[in-house]
Amino acid sequence: MEGENNMKTVAYLGPKGSFTEVAAKALLPNETHIPFRSIPDCMDAVNEDAVDRAIVPLENAIEGSVNITLDYLIHHQRMEMAAEVTAPIFQNLMTNKKHADDWKEIDAVYSHPQAIAQCHQFLRNYIPNAEIRYTNSTAEAAKFVSESEEKIAALANETSASEYGLAIVKSKVNDYKNNSTRFIALQKGSLNKSFEQMDGVSLYKTTIMVTLPLDYTGALHQVLSAFAWRKINLSKIESRPMKTGLGNYFFIIDIDMKKDEVLIPGVQEELKALGCKVEVLGSYPCFQWEALCALQNK
C-alpha cells in the first residue's frame, strides 16, 4: 500500500450524496473519495489495496450499532480502526419536484433501514399508507427516486436532494432531534502519517474484542472488574453473536483512553489469565464535527 504522503483514495458507502460521503470529506477532505455500493464492498476495497482507507458508519445514537459494519469487520475483513468522527444526522423527506405538492399521497418511501427506523413516528403520522422499501444507503434511495416516474419519496440528507435534483417536502423528520452517527476510518495497519497529527482531536478511544471462556462462572463480572479497579472508564460494552450457536457471544468494549504501556496491557493480561481471548481492534483519535467543519472553513 502507498504511504500516507501518496495516499489518494478513500472508500465510502455511496452513491454520491450519502451521509458517509459527507463524513469522509470532513475527515479526509484532501483525498479522492470513491463510492461503493455496500459497507462490505468498502472494506473489501481496502483489503484488496484498491483504496487506502474506508469510512463506514459504526453506530447511530437512535438505532444503535450498524451490525453489518461490526459483523463484517469481526468475521470477514479484520483491519485497524484508525479514527472516528461523530456527525449530526438530519433526515429529510424528498420527492421529484412534480410530486412535491401532493407528497402525502405518495405510494412508497425508500431509504436505508436505519433511516427508516429513525423516522418511524413521522412516517406513521404523516404517510401511514406508504409502503416502506429498503436500500443500501440513503443516497441510493434519493438517486432511485430521481430516476423514477412513480409517486415515491426518499429519506436522505440535503446533499442528496441537491445532488439528484429532488424537492425536500419535509425537513428534519427524524423522531429525535439529537440524532448522530459515529463513522470509523478503517485501514490495513498503520500508515506513515497518523490521524493523531491532525487538528480537531477531542479524545481517544481504544476498542477491544473480548471472548469469554464458556465454562467460567461470573466471567463477565471479572472482565468488568479488571477495568474498574484500575479506574478505566468504559463508554460502551456490547455483546455480539459468535455465529457458532445460540448463547455464544463476544463483547466489543470501547475504552475512553489511548492504548498505553501499563493500564490497558495490564487489563489484557488479567483477562487472558481468566481464559478470555482479547484482541485490540484499534486505538484511535476521535474528532469533533464542529472542529473539522471550522478547519475547512478557514
Image: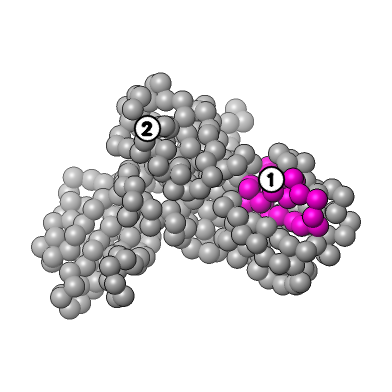
Q: Which mark is residue 143?
A: 1
- Number of numbered callouts drawn: 2
Residue 206 visible in the current orientation: no
Q: Amino acid at mark 1?
A: Lys
Is residue 293 found left or right of 65 in the rendered image?
right
Q: CA distance from mark 1 to mark 2?
A: 28 Å
Q: Which residue is mark 2?
A: 49
Q: Amino acid at mark 2?
A: Asp
Quadrant position of residue 295: top right
The residue at 40%/46% (across/down) is 203
Q: How far across and down, in percent of the image, does residue 80 sit?
A: 33, 43
Quadrant occupied by the N terminus: top left
Q: Residue furthest top?
A: 6
The residue at 43%/53% (across/down) is 69
Of residues 48 and 29, which is closer to you in this image? 48
Helix or strand or loop: what does disc 2 sit on? loop
Residue 14 visible in the current orientation: yes
Is residue 39 found left or right of 172 in the rendered image?
left
